[in-house]
Amino acid sequence: MESAGHRRLFRKLRMRLFQRIYIIMKHLVSLLLFVFVVPCFATEPVKILSTNVRLGDANDGENSWKFRKDFLLQVVKEGNYDFIGGQEVLTTTDSDNNQIRFFFENLPNYGIVFKNREKDGVARGEGTPIFYRTDRWRIDPEDQGSFWLSDTPSVPGSVTWEGQSTCPRVCTGGLFHEIDKDGKLTGKTLYVYSTHFDHVGEIPRQKAAAVIFEKIASRKDKTAPVVLMGDLNCGENSPAVRFLKGETVVLGGEEKVPQMKLLDTFRVVHPNEKQVATFNGFRGPKLDGEKIDYIFITPDLKATEAEIIRVDRNGKYPSDHYAFRETLEL
């Protein structure tokens, strides 16, 4: 027969066994939640590419568009980017050099926001399009389009600043709504813009920065974060870039206080990098020049990766600028 002592010992052993089973089950449940539930709520990063593609009908000899377009397409496609901002992207009746059509036909899962920079009705013209993944993003039809970098931003083809080249300059973009796999809105939004500053005039570049900030600051949804990318044709210490980064500077002879502040994503990730040149001129890996291509973001976004894509095939380059990629947390 069992003694009272044996029964007490049995109860203690049983209690300890139950406690251990409870602890094991608790850890197991936590592990299962981490493996199966957390990924459902993880935010997919936003991947962005900016690239000056070099004008399609430029007379570049062995570096002409027909010889490098497939190489550039490979660079553009292999990142599965959410947004691709282009500069010098040409639309023309010449089908061999129509870069807009080339990218549109070869990026079947992307939509496009685009208007060439010339006056209305002109068939040939370059622009700064935004290509976007249609399986993740939906463009707001009431909040998208282009404006011109001039004193009359709403006038297509306008060139109003002394010292500017004869080329009109434009900025294109809009408000994008994130959608899930079922096409339903997630509630997350993002403004994305692509632009190209003048290659001749310093004052027009300065004034262009002011116009862009006026437009972005007056956007309809001021709670939505902003991405601004492009070829600005000026270095990191230029007045235009310093203004975009929130510094009060003299622009076009007038002191300007910026309405907002943007972050240079490359410097967020690589604050001390010295080899930052983004223009190669088809001549090879020039690394110690100025960074003139940028992806800027508002401070409510987080840059986690940044790379100047310096690739070549036997000394041949996809464009005369290096493409620039960025990964963000939204």
Image (spheres, rainbow, N blue to C red):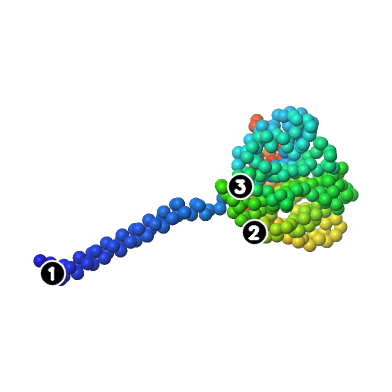
Task: Judge by depth and name the residue closer to the eye, 7 or 195.
Answer: 7
Residue plotted at (73% across, 58% down): 220
Quick one: quadrant of the C terminus? bottom right
Task: Judge by depth and name the residue closer to the eye, 237 or 303.
Answer: 303
Sequence-first disc among 1 and 3: 1
Query: Relative to 179, does residue 107 appear above or below in the rendering?
Result: above
Mark 2 highlights which residue?
A: 300
Residue plotted at (69% across, 37% down): 104
Give the x, y percent position of residue 97. Answer: 75, 32
Residue density around tag 1, few if under 14, some if 14–19, many if 20 or more, within 10 Å: few
Q: Secondary structure at mark 3?
A: loop
Q: Quadrant of residue 320?
A: top right
**Circles 2, 3 touching at the beta carbon (< 8 Å):** no
Task: Judge by depth and name the residue closer to the eye, 182 or 223.
Answer: 182
Determine which of the numbered discs, if any, sits on residue 38 in the image: none
Residue density around tag 3, few if under 14, some if 14–19, many if 20 or more, within 10 Å: many
Q: Secondary structure at mark 2?
A: loop
Q: Can see residue 135?
A: yes
Q: How many marks?
A: 3
Tag nearer the camera, 1 or 2 = 1
Tag nearer the camera, 2 or 3 = 3
Mark 1 highlights which residue?
A: 3
Q: Can see residue 47?
A: no
Q: Amino acid at mark 1?
A: Ser
Give the x, y percent position of residue 192. Answer: 69, 50
Give the x, y percent position of residue 126. Answer: 78, 39
Q: Secondary structure at mark 1?
A: loop
Mark 3 highlights which residue?
A: 136
Tag nearer the camera, 1 or 3 = 3
